[in-house]
Image (spheres, rainbow, N blue to C red):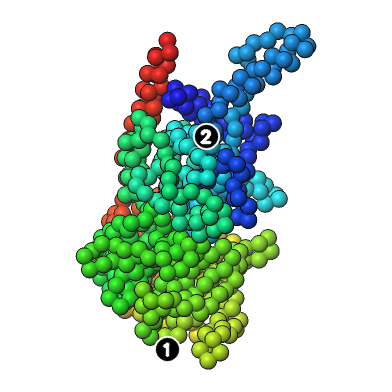
Amino acid sequence: MHGNIIRICLVLAMTVLVAACQSSNPIQNTQLNDQQPLKLGQGVVALELINNTDRLGNLHPNWGEVIIIRIDNEEQRKQAAIAKAKEKALKKGKTFDPEAVDWEHEYFSLRPNSKGTVSSQLFVGAMPEGEYLIGSLYSYYNDGNMSSWITMPVFQSAGVFEVKATQLTNLGTIVFQPLLNTKEPSFWSNRTEQRAYVTRLSGDTDLAPFVKHHYQNLASSMDFSSINSWKEDPFTELRAKLGSLSKSNAYGERAIALQGSELNALAARFGLLHLVNGQGDLTTESLPTSSQLTSSLHFQGNLLVGSERGLLFSKAQNGQWQSSQPISAKEAFVWLGSANGFGYALASSQKQHVLYRFAGADTRWQKIGEFKKKANNNWLVQNGGLFVFFDAQGEPKIINDNKLLSFNEATNSWQATKYKSFKKFSQLKTGELIAVEVSQWDGFGDQVISLDYGQSWQTIERSTRLFGDAKADATLPALLPNNQIASVGRVKTVKGSKKNKLRIITADIQNASDKTKWTPHGELKANCSTQLAELTQGSTLFFLCDQGQVVSTSDLGQSWDVRIDIDIARMQAQYEAFLASQKKEAKANSDEKL
């Protein structure tokens, strides 16, 4: 069996998806219908897919399909195709060569269930009993004017799994790990094996609760007493090393001004939480989840961390992390805050946001608002996002696109007034609001700041390129001591020079709307133009790089320190060891047949 699998991997890796799409044998849909039982002989497959990068490409934020190949019936299908071709040749009196007959595997498509996720993706579907492997990851884009597709071969990189009737096959967490920069236009046209890898994490990612919660009627007819998973093979240990490397080099972009603490936080994939103290020192916590962490709050003496699938984590006195699920698995935490003795949580589901209030993390949570989600944009209009902040009295306010909503305790209702629209938004621990406005031109408009809890806003005027500074344009401004504001802009430092480079720029807050009042400082580190404003501690500024590294400067860009490194070289070396092991195994199997 290993020889067949490796042959498929090495020979068909770059062509199988195109062949499946163009063949007369269509890819079979695996979508679950919760109102109908499983078909006879079918089982359910579930997997979590994590892209260890912010997005796959300009038109592809995530994968749209996981293409599965059935391998236990390949000889049966081959012989059936030969018999059919032989019969046809005999009827026409033609010569017949069985080795020249084309035959096809069975292909199945898993599509994502986006309820309760933010950056991770959950794929669940039903397939007949048998043995399978993941052929590829696939994404397709079409807006009527243009189309684009990308694919990533998987095959033996993940391994073989088995499906049994009425049972769940839990494949745990699959990782897509870029080794080259996905921001480079050449990434997806580069066919080298060394551009990226796909592997699986070792350890338990229990997806049975997700299946039970999302498909309650169907799950009632399933047998969860025995859960299937991956089959053991010679590459299990190498995959575990690859998965461990990806996890320790997790991508994190969710900066949090952590309320109730001197700390600030950077939430990352694979359950990693980076904490920055008042002196700018950084420590890392590993929580018992492989999903994206999304939000954090210090409340009633406890550090609370929100994640996907409704999971909330708190740190016990013995230093161990404990998990609870105060909200539905169909929701993901996206924000945590506290005021006037209450904790608040904003959750995101497929079509709406929900705001909860709680007196204690382990008490019953009260749902105090439901707000319809708006798409980021349509072909006519760029829409703003939904954000929460507290006013001077500690009352929660909701910004939903161009509406400001205030809660009326007496009527238990929300009252709306017209307001600004924002693409990005955050409230600092000292109360100031920092944001990026919506632009109907390209999505992201001006940076703005409010010092009076949103009653008035001051525009931050700076110079960036009309095209080409998307990362800098989309980031929030940072506040420094002595009423100084720090941002990023293009400044000519040599009179008469046509070159202007991205630099850290500072100004007094009251002068931030005048471009001529900005003071330029050091250049940004290459490919590190996303300012993580919420991590700012004193005069120390933090920036996110394209591949996930985090750098800081305490002297406004004159010198830089790497605070979170992404060890691409080590992952590359480990992946090459995996490929070498594959080729060695393939040769051994080939020699056995001679």
Residue 265 appears in view: no
Residue 592 appears in view: yes
Residue with the most extreme bottom position: 410
Label 1 near label 2: C-beta < 8 Å? no
N-term-proximal mark, 2 vs 1: 2
Residue 465 is situated, as x and y percent measured from the top left of the image, at 52, 59
Residue 132 is situated, as x and y percent measured from the top left of the image, at 50, 35
Position of residue 471 relative to residue 385, above or below, is above
Position of residue 168 relative to residue 277, above or below, is above
Give the residue number, with chain letter if any, for mark 1. 393
Classed neighbour count for the residue bearing mark 2: other residues with Cα under 10 Å, few (<14), some (14–19), many (≥20): some
Would you identify the image quadrant in which residue 579 lies?
top left
Amino acid at pointer 1: Gln
Would you identify the image quadrant in which residue 65 lies?
top right
Question: Is 380 positioned to the left or the right of 136 in the image?
Answer: right
The residue sitting at 54% across, 33% down in the picture is 70
Residue 262 is situated, as x and y percent measured from the top left of the image, at 28, 73
Position of residue 223 relative to residue 349, above or below, is above
Task: Give the numbered dot on residue 506.
Answer: none
Task: Give the numbered dot on residue 130.
Answer: 2
The residue sitting at 56% across, 62% down in the picture is 350
The front one of 540 and 298 is: 298
The residue sitting at 54% across, 70% down in the picture is 353
